[in-house]
Amino acid sequence: MTAYASPASAHSAAAPHGSADRRASSASCASGGVGGNSVVQILQDNCPDLALHAGLVIEHLDAQVGTWQFSTDGGQTWRTVRTDLINRAGSLGLALDRDARLRVLPFGGSRVTSARLAFHAVSRSHGSGNGSYRAYATDDREDDSPTVTLVLSLGAINGLPPAVHVPRPRNKRALVQRAAQAMNASAMGNAMAMA
């Protein structure tokens, strides 16, 4: 996982628009359950100095990796990010508050394990504009909000599944012997009680 800041606009390195980009721009996708990492979690893990900001504006997403989605309701519903809008020349970005969630669904057969995203942090909440596409200034922004480009593993974007405790497999023969011993002890106890 690599993180670096870039004061220049990320649009100069925008990926070419192809069929993968068009697939990523489909209208919306609903999915039950919670997934993806929240904006604040991504900032805390990768840019701790920006974690106190109210949100961000995504300027560029790696559309060759898969379909990017965001959720503004805690992961109950997901909408596909219009990478065809934010990756083209110009200054249009996706506005997300700190509690919004982001994920990428890799294309089938893809061996890619990381993805690039570029954004700038904002000090005020987007309010009703959370999840909308907004024009942003490329030069005259707040002093503490340069464009930041991150290259993250898919696990850092999507979140890792919770750790599940799986008991270590035991020797079956030992388990059978232990069960037999317990039955014998129980039978002996019952016989002594009857006597």
Image (cartoon, rainbow, N blue to C red):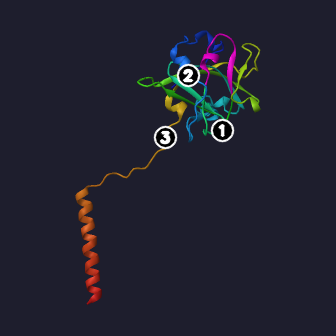
Q: Bin the neighbour count of mark 2 within 10 Å (Cα to Cα): few under 14, some 14-19, many 20 and up.
A: many
- Alpha carbons under labels 1 and 3: distance apart: 20 Å
Quick check: is 26 in the magenta stretch? no
Q: How crowded is mark 1: few (under 14 residues within 10 Å), some or many (20 or more)?
A: few
Of residues 87 and 161, the one drawn nearer to the viewer in this rendering: 87
Reading the image, the residue beneath label 1 is 73
Q: Quadrant of residue 49?
A: top right
Q: Which amino acid does label 1 sit on?
A: Asp
Q: Which mark is residue 24?
A: 2
Gap in angstroms between the C-alphas marked 2 and 1: 20 Å
Q: Is mark 1 on a helix, strand or loop?
A: loop
Residue at (56% x, 35% y) in the render: 36
- Which stretch is magenta? 81-95
Quadrant in the picture for residue 91? top right
Where residue 93 appears, x then y in whole percent?
68, 20
The kind of residue tagged 2 is Ala
Q: Position of residue 32 (x, y in %)?
A: 56, 40
What residue is shown with label 3?
161
Q: Nearer the viewer, mark 2 or mark 1?
A: 2
- The amino acid type found where label 3 is placed reads Pro
Lower sequence index among marks 2 and 1: 2
Q: Which of marks 2 and 3 is nearer the N terminus?
A: 2
Q: Which of 108 and 43 is in front in this view?
A: 108
Residue 166 lies, with reference to residue 128, above or below; the image says: below
Tell me the SS state at disc 3. Answer: loop
Q: Position of residue 143 (x, y in %)?
A: 75, 20
| Left or right of 143, for residue 104 | left
